[in-house]
Amino acid sequence: MKIKDGFILREVAGSYIVVAVGSAVKTFNGVINLNQTGAFLWELLQKGAEKEDLVKALLEEYEVDEQTASKDVDVFIEKLEQANLIK
């Protein structure tokens, strides 16, 4: 899985936002707000991480059990798919 080209993550005043750039602006209007965990997962997806990689990274980075991490990753990926942001 990978974030589609044309989307960048920026930290602004302690908040994480994703904006479309270039030709992606034609198909995506708006801004996506992410929390710190969402930004962490986004950066991994930019490198082509798969679900298993994301769950493992959450387990290593945060104090969370595997079931919760897996469920949270599923929800995050589903939202990105609904917004047509990953390939």
Image (spheres, helix red, strand yellow):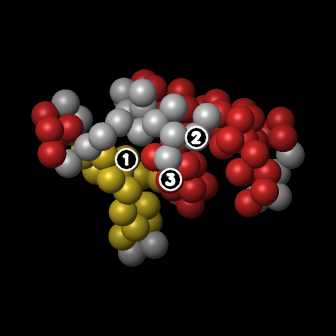
Name the foreground residue: 79 vs 1: 1
Camera-near label (2 vs 3) is 2
At 57% from the left edge and 56% from the top edge, which residue is drawn?
40
Task: Answer left or right for 50 relative to 81.
Answer: right
Mark 1: few, some, or many residues within 10 Å (few <14, many ≥20)? Answer: few
Q: Which residue lies furthest to the front in this view?
A: 47
How far apart, in angstroms, are the residues tagged by discs 1 and 2? 20 Å
Q: Which mark is residue 32?
A: 1
At 39% from the left edge and 75% from the top edge, which residue is drawn?
13
Rendered view: 82 above or below 40: above
Q: Mark 1–mark 3 contact, CB under 8 Å?
A: no
Q: Reading the chain from its start, which is encountered first: label 2 or label 3?
A: 3
Q: Reading the chain from its start, which is encountered first: label 1 or label 2?
A: 1
Q: Mark 2 points at which residue?
A: 49
Camera-near label (1 vs 3) is 3
Q: Where is residue 19 in the image (x, y as percent from the top left)?
A: 28, 50
Rendered view: 73 above or below 35: above
Is any atom of residue 74 visible in this view? yes
Q: Mark 1–mark 2 contact, CB under 8 Å?
A: no
Q: Mark 3 points at which residue?
A: 43
Task: Answer left or right for 7 relative to 16.
Answer: left
Q: Which mark is residue 17?
A: none
Task: Answer left or right for 19 relative to 80.
Answer: left
Q: Position of residue 56 (x, y in %)?
A: 75, 45
Is any atom of residue 31 visible in this view? no
How far apart, in angstroms, are the residues tagged by discs 1 and 3? 14 Å
Q: Which amino acid does label 1 sit on?
A: Ile
At 84% from the left edge and 41% from the top edge, which residue is drawn?
66
Q: SS of the residue at dot 3?
A: helix
Q: Which amino acid does label 2 sit on?
A: Ala
